[in-house]
Image (cartoon, coloured by chain):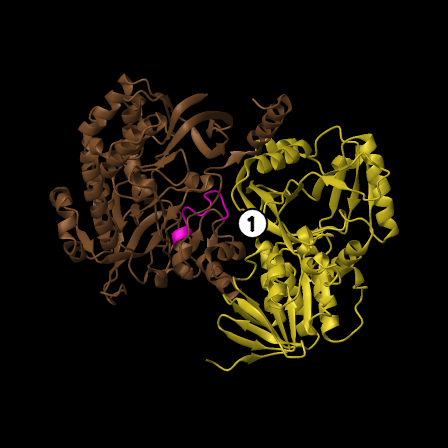
Amino acid sequence: MSEPLTCDVVVVGAGMVGAACALYATRAGLEVTVVDRGHVAGGTTGAGEGNLLVSDKAPGPELELALLSTRLWAREAREPGAAAEYEAKGGLVVAETPEALDRLREFAGTQRAAGVSADPVPADRLHDLEPRLAAGLAGAVHYPQDAQVMPALAAAHFLRASGARLLTGREVTRVLRAPDGTVRGVRTDRGDLHAPAVVNAAGTWGGELAERAGVFLPVLPRRGFVLVTEPLPPRIRHKVYAADYVADVASDSAALQTSPVVEGTAAGPVLIGASRERVGFDRSLSLPAVRALAAGATRLFPFLSRVRALRTYAGFRPYLPDHLPAIGPDPRAPGLFHACGHEGAGIGLATGTGLLIAQALTGRTPGLDLTPFRPDRFPCPAQEAAP
Amino acid sequence: MRTDLAVIGAGPAGLAAALAASARGVRVVLVDAAPEPGGQFYRQPAPGLRARHPEALHHQWRAWTRLRDGLAASPVRVLADHHVWCVERESGGLTVHALRGPEQERSVEVRAAAVLLATGGYETVLPFPGWTLPGVVTAGGAQAMLKGGLVVAGGTAVVAGTGPLLLPVATGLAAAGVRVAALVESADPRRLLRHAGALARKLPEGAGYAARLLRHGVPVLARHTVLRAHGGGTSRPGGAGRGGDRLTGVTVAALDGRGRVRSGTERLLPCDTLAVGHGMLPHTDLAEGLGCRLDGRRVAVDAEQRTDVPGVWAAGESTGVGGAALALAEGHIAGRSIAARLRGTAPDPGEWAPAAGVRARMRSVAAALESAWAPPARWTDRVTDDTVVCRCEEVTAGAVREALALGAGDTRTVKLLSRAGMGWCQGRMCGPAVAGLTGCEPTPSSSPFARPVPLGVLADGHRAHEDRTEEGPS
């Protein structure tokens, strides 16, 4: 067997979050190895639309992380962002009825108080921003901070820019721990990698990797479909979606139901995504889900009726029961850090996550309070069952 | 529309199955994208052309007239010009979703208890410098032009690539008055001899082609390949594809036993048409959308031609490329199996023993041909970085190679990082080339849509479905 490789940090997962962790960790002076059982962007990253959104987030820890991430994405816009088709195109959330518009504006007001740029757009100005929108909409809110990136290219170019060693096609079978419980590396199906720190950026498999480190983290998959059209000349300028709030305004859950996000891409196709279903890891085509996406998109943009969908694909969002990611050190296994469970927002939240992980790895004070993202916040089912 | 059996594809397999099932009392709807039944193999000249001797371009003309007349006399309902984009499993049966109309925008649904996938195959063309020039056509495309439109492709043609299709294309073009400057076949004909036993039935056919090539004075260059195609105005050998707006000639060279170019054998063949093909692959999109198990690149079927999805049968090239005789046998067996199974009885295989015998023989012939006619081992060496590989998205070989450097390692991640295969044809054309260039296992193109579908059709489906749900269970 060959000599085990040694470095400062092993990042498990060559998706967007792992790539961002690698970039910020190497910039902090650490020697990083990224290991993935598949290939670069082979998991959820490769199935995403590349939404960098603040518009869909209510004030709270996730919005704070999104605002931090948005600033960092803008900073990376030239390199490596440009190679990843980064575009600060802005989002446009439209309301179909006056009631929905009232609630949207109220929601935007709370976001503004939290630092989001959210500009009301009256009905008669809508078509200046988005000429092909349907007629008869009540109004909208424009979010200039929303942006877009091609996620697979982003992960690949962040990894390249990091200079980290990349080992693909290697599965981590166990996170190695010393007798005192501290992490000392990983065992893979092709040899050991020794390091005092391991970052779990394994996306939907983050729960499985946690188990291989001997800790509990209930990451679950939620399926989503994305519809891709034939390439078109630029016709849709923003990320556009409709907001309808659940009628119960008294509820503080601010449960938000959205239509699919419709957007043009640098390469030409329009992306329509994404549905949400909890069906485990089933990749087979769900015609009802795809039809619902098409209905939502053509309602916003009637011209899309005659545009052809070329393909649809499924991806799996990794989510945790409280819909917040796990970010930071795991007190149950010193040396283990988690950066997973971002649900449908992992591309957008990757930069902030990467920076926070790098800060934690180097012992600096994280730029955000990590308490809401604590990886040990979920009681292990076995302990729960105990008296 | 409701029926017992929906047959998708009106080529040899689909026709044979439709007739066999219909003769046993099964209500059959035959769905096909072309204006007339016949498929690629029995492609017919458009009636408006008033072809006087269409049989001149077809062998097995008698088999075709029997199928054609049988179909006319049968109650089989033919839906021509219907483009199937999806087959959906629903409780109590299957729904075939098709598009029709000049713009393929009108939606048609056929509900059936059983579906036969007779979707045929498609041609593989591997890239080389200059292959995107006007004047370069696929071998199958040249044959379709001959059979369907009766148009003569050009004055001087070269037929190149590998596979049994090149022979009828070369003789067909020559018979139509085209000067065929060469038939350039990369395989070594001696490899065919190793399979002489399995190929014994094909030998008379092969001998017939050889005689015709000789009669038309078509030179055969075996173990040769086209290195590059040259465009108009820049016929200098280095000017592959650039500056020219039309094909003016090709550079061919001899290959050694390991697939490398023998130095000093390059020579220029002036021509205005290059018909090029590298074999056939099964069409599996609909089967994959249904979740049918594949065996390599083909739909896996049992002895009755059943897939592993209940109610779904497959026959013909989609279960393995093997030609019209094999497709007829498989279709016949499938049709009889479906008739029995829809009655709730198990079929008696003894009834189709002759067809099963043909199927067994033709499958061994197909296996022998497949191993004899393989693209030359080192073909990717000759694909320069500036050669376009994915024509839909205009992705070059250099960009595909760069995706590997960025960390891609399978066909999916290569596609994500290079865009090769993301366009209109969804990688049907470039899939084998990308797999060859990257060393990744070729995987079937796995788009759930067998063809592009208007969003309006999908959206209408959503509304129709919601209406049904509101009405309650129907």
Residue lying at the far bottom in this picture: please name it.
Answer: A3
Position of B35 with respect to A93 (left or right) is left
Residue occupying the far front of the picture: A387
Chain ID, brown in image: B
Asked whether the viewer can see residue A83, the reply is: no
Determine if the magenta segment contains residue B429: yes
Task: Name above or below for residue B258 compared with residue A103.
Answer: below
Report the span colored magenta: B422-432
x and y percentages locating residue A40 in the rendered image: 55, 62
User: Which quadrant holds residue A364?
Assistant: bottom right
Chain at numbered mark 1: A
SS for tag 1? loop
The relative height of residue A204 versus residue B147 in the rendered view (above or below) is below
In the rendered view, does B164 fall on the left or right side of A22?
left
Q: Colour of chain A?
A: yellow
Drawn side of residue B456 relative to residue B213, left or right: right
Q: What residue type is labelled 1?
A: Phe
Q: Nearer the viewer, residue A214 or A78?
A: A214
Which residue was labeled with disc 1? A281
Q: Which residue is drawn at 20% across and 33% down?
A: B350
Name the dominant secondary structure of the magenta segment: loop
Q: In this view, does B439 lie to the left or right of A275?
A: left
Please name whichever residue, B147 or A165, is drawn nearer the observer in this view of the structure: A165
> In the figure, residue B235 lies in which quadrant?
bottom left
Q: Position of residue A82 (x, y in %)?
A: 64, 59
Queried whether the magenta region covers residue B55, the answer comes back as no
Residue at image coords 19%, 39%: B358
The C terminus of chain A is located in which quarter?
bottom right
